[in-house]
Amino acid sequence: MKNVEKYSRSYFMPPVTSRKWMEKEYITEAPVWCSVDLRDGNQALVVPLTLEEKLEYFQLLVKIGFKEIEVGFPAASETEYTFLRTLIEQNLIPDDVTIQVLTQSRDHIIEKTFESLKGVNKAIVHLYNSTSLAQRDQVFKKSKEEIIDIAVSGAKLLQKYAAATEGNFIFQYSPESFTGTELDFALEICNRVLDVWQPAADNKVIINLPATVSLSMPHVYASQIEFMSDHLNHRENVILSIHPHNDRGCGVADAELAMLAGGQRIEGTLFGNGERTGNVDIVTLALNMFSHGVDPQLDFENTPEIRAVYERLTNMRVHERHPYAGKLVFTAFSGSHQDAITKGFKWREGKESEHWKVPYLVIDPMDIGREYEGDIIRINSQSGKGGIGYLLEQQYSLDLPAQMRESFGYNVKNVSDHLNKELMPHEIYDIFIDGYVNIKTPVAFIDYQFTKHDDFQTVLTICINDEVQEITGVGNGRLDAISNALQTKLGISFTDLVYKEHAQEIGSKSNAVSYIGITDINGTVNWGCGIDADIMNSSVKALFSAVNNMITSLKLPIQMDSSLTTK
Ligand SMILES: CC(=O)SCCNC(=O)CCNC(=O)[C@H](O)C(C)(C)COP(=O)(O)OP(=O)(O)OC[C@H]1O[C@@H](n2cnc3c(N)ncnc32)[C@H](O)[C@@H]1OP(=O)(O)O
Ligand SMILES: CC(C)C(=O)C(=O)O
Ligand SMILES: [Mg+2]
């Protein structure tokens, strides 16, 4: 590409790296989750949330189970200020939830922040200033020591205003733009703030290391976090927090590796909303843990509802391919995937206590409020017999014989291919009913009678071209007698009867369903299905359907035997 020479890596590796995080295989327990939806998400919306919308969003976050929620930057705007006051004055903050507010390191802003917190029971006050080389040079035009002064003076101001305000306050410091900061400097500024705050076991402090702009691959961020975790003063009394953004599409990977590297707390948003490409997506992070059998301590058992509220309030859309929450992420269109999933479901029957291992489905969609119907198997021209058969079975209680599934599968595929569209379950059902069930042309079944001596003898009443006829046949069984009557009297021939039957329960109705396959003179199997309250009738109707399909596909002239009697 043109202009590539314009760019170079602008992050810093730690002076020493131990990469202990590489030895760890997975995350063993949930971090402390802090939602920053109401700040980061809100400040990045085209139209920021109204007071009422913020209240509804706050309640959603509480319901999901967040115990720490950043409610905004109260000194920044009237809405944010009023929102915080409303939460406090209307007593809307549950006892087990700590709210968090953000402030720059400036006296009047800190003062206003504490003013907005009056009457709060407990709050995290989050102080930040930018520390990166780029911001020091271009924005603040200050030396390292002057930047440290901003942080240290802010840290002292937090102590001063906290002492003068009733309530319990937890302090948090972020070296904003950490990922563009030399690591020894990031460490120094955090330690200088910690030395002011003197954290203790009963007064822990949060150090938050944001990937304000993500600049490196995730393993670099992990090494940066590990370096800080290993070298921070008062480490045992510091809660190490991480705050990834998604500029390189690595927000989740950054967070996961950073947790292995010592991160104990995550700041992020639902569905990764937030500035530019967004913050780290907490839904994905939490459900990634869940898929490893680790309880994320957040309730995403109804993701469709959470997604709906989120979309309505933010006016943003959760992408169809979004992990776990996207509309299409559990859906298999392609034949081999559908086949494997349906076999996986069958395999699990009776083994529900075993760990989830269904191919292609990372977790059981039902666990997060998704539905099998309409969510998992959808049919288009890429689909195969497995998925199509599965849909008929699940939604219409029609369990086709394996060979018939194949033939019907190709039939459905062709229809979808020619229409160039997805087929809904009811359309697939209609194709099945129209093509295979109780087919009456050219030969309609009307009635039968049997007598049994050594063999079965039948007198079969049929109708061809509006003419009702009686024909007779003999066979080992009833169906055999009917089959022989049709072949000898209509001048057609077929072999190898494939037969299957089952009961069909739909609502309060119960029917018998029979499937019959007959092989014609070219070796092709022709299929038919009969559905009737009576099992013998369903078998006979299935045979007539198969025979009719064979006559139609071979364009056979029906030769009436001279011995036919007209009724
Ligand atoms: C990565 C993040 O998400 S950071 C958080 C971003 N969120 C927000 O900024 C919330 C919305 N912000 C606002 O509404 C406004 O910025 C306010 C009300 C907070 C402050 O507004 P203003 O006083 O008009 O100033 P503004 O934000 O432009 O600040 C610029 C000045 O503050 C200084 N400054 C910026 N950030 C900080 C900081 N964290 N600590 C101390 N000083 C800071 C700048 O160096 C600049 O100084 P200068 O006047 O000497 O040039
Ligand atoms: C305020 C800080 C923590 C922030 O949001 C960021 O750096 O992304
Ligand atoms: Mg941020």
Image: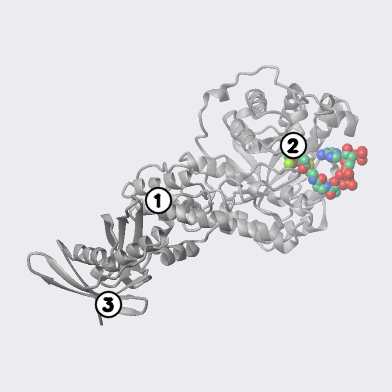
Q: Real-space Cα distance between discs 1 and 3?
A: 35 Å
- Place residue 154 in its image quadrant: top right
Q: Real-space Cα distance between discs 2 and 3?
A: 85 Å
Image quadrant where one finds the C terminus: bottom left
Q: Position of residue 298 (x, y in %)?
A: 54, 48
* Type of amino acid at the residue the image marks with label 1: Glu
Image quadrant where one finds the N terminus: top right
Label 2 SS? loop
**Residue drawn at 68 percent across, 63 percent down:** 90
Q: Which residue is mark 1?
A: 406
Sequence-first tag of 2 and 3: 2
Which mark lies nearer to you, 1 or 2?
1
Q: Is residue 210 visible?
A: yes
Q: Is residue 526 above or below residue 442?
A: above
Q: Is residue 514 above or below residue 208?
A: below
Q: Position of residue 559 (x, y in %)?
A: 31, 68
* Type of amino acid at the residue the image marks with label 3: Gln
Sequence-first tag of 1 and 2: 2
Q: Is mark 2 within 8 Å of ligand 2?
A: yes
Q: Position of residue 436 (x, y in %)?
A: 39, 63
Crowding near pointer 2: few (<14 within 10 Å), some, many (20+)?
Answer: many
**Residue drawn at 41 percent across, 41 percent down:** 357
Q: Position of residue 165 (x, y in %)?
A: 74, 49
Q: Is residue 80 left or right of residue 289?
A: right
Q: Real-space Cα distance between discs 1 and 2?
A: 54 Å
The disc label shown at residue 469, or none = 3
Residue found at the very far top of the displayed protein:
16
Q: Which residue is mark 2?
A: 212
Crowding near pointer 1: few (<14 within 10 Å), some, many (20+)?
Answer: some
- Place residue 416 in its image quadrant: bottom right
